[in-house]
Amino acid sequence: MTQSDIESADTPTRLSNGGQFPALEFAKVGGGTISLPSDLSGGYGVVLFYRGAWCPYCNAQLAAFQRAHDSLGAAGIAVVAISVDDESAAAALVSKRRLGFAVGYGADADQVAAATGAYVNADPKYLQSTGFVLAPDGTVVTAVYSSGAIGRLVPDDVIGLVRYIQSPG
């Protein structure tokens, strides 16, 4: 992959810390929808846009968030993950990695990029890894944008950040 494979000329401004995360909806593995940021309101949330079930780096990231499930829960942090994958690929990933958090599928890469500033791979079209930590009110605490395979949120950093924010003075 070369830098020219990444569409960025029309990419809007990235989301800023303190700004409201946009309202987005995605089909959810197992049925129903994921409605962001409302499904994460009331507690801290992590939104992970991942490249697809085929990506080894994404598999490692999602598996790490699953392993940290208890620690994330104890810190009051919920996780959702979304990709352009079709339902069968997303469901197979959930089963293979035994993911206990909501996983969305069928995302429109261009629409997500327009709303969040995520990078989009041109051919084949998919979202590059993008992660957000959201405050209980749906505002962005931090955003991590990757233009390629590496550079993404990790659970220990998310837990540490939330604990830091919640610590007195």
Image (tube, grey):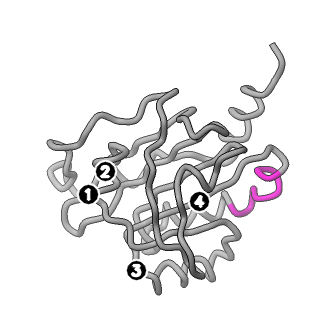
Image disc number at residue 113: 2
Between the C-alphas of marks 4 and 1, the distance is 19 Å
Image disc number at residue 110: 1
Do labels 1 and 2 touch, CB within 8 Å?
yes
Secondary structure predominantly adopted by residues drawn in magenta: helix
Disc 1 is placed on an element classified as helix
Disc 2 is placed on an element classified as helix
Image disc number at residue 92: none
Residue found at x 25% / y 66%: 125
Neighbour tally class for label 3: few under 14, some 14-19, many 20 plus, Cα within 10 Å: some
Which residue is tagged 3?
A: 86
Question: Is-magenta flag for residue 69?
Answer: yes
Between the C-alphas of marks 3 and 1, the distance is 16 Å
In the picture provided, is 54 more to the left or to the right than 35? Answer: left
Q: Is residue 50 above or below residue 40?
A: below
Q: Is residue 70 above or below residue 100?
A: above
Do labels 3 and 1 touch, CB within 8 Å?
no
- Find the magenta span and give its range: 66-73
- How far from the left and from the top, in percent, is residue 35? 53, 59
Q: Is residue 6 above or below residue 15?
A: below
Image disc number at residue 80: 4
Q: Nearer the viewer, residue 9 or 140?
A: 140
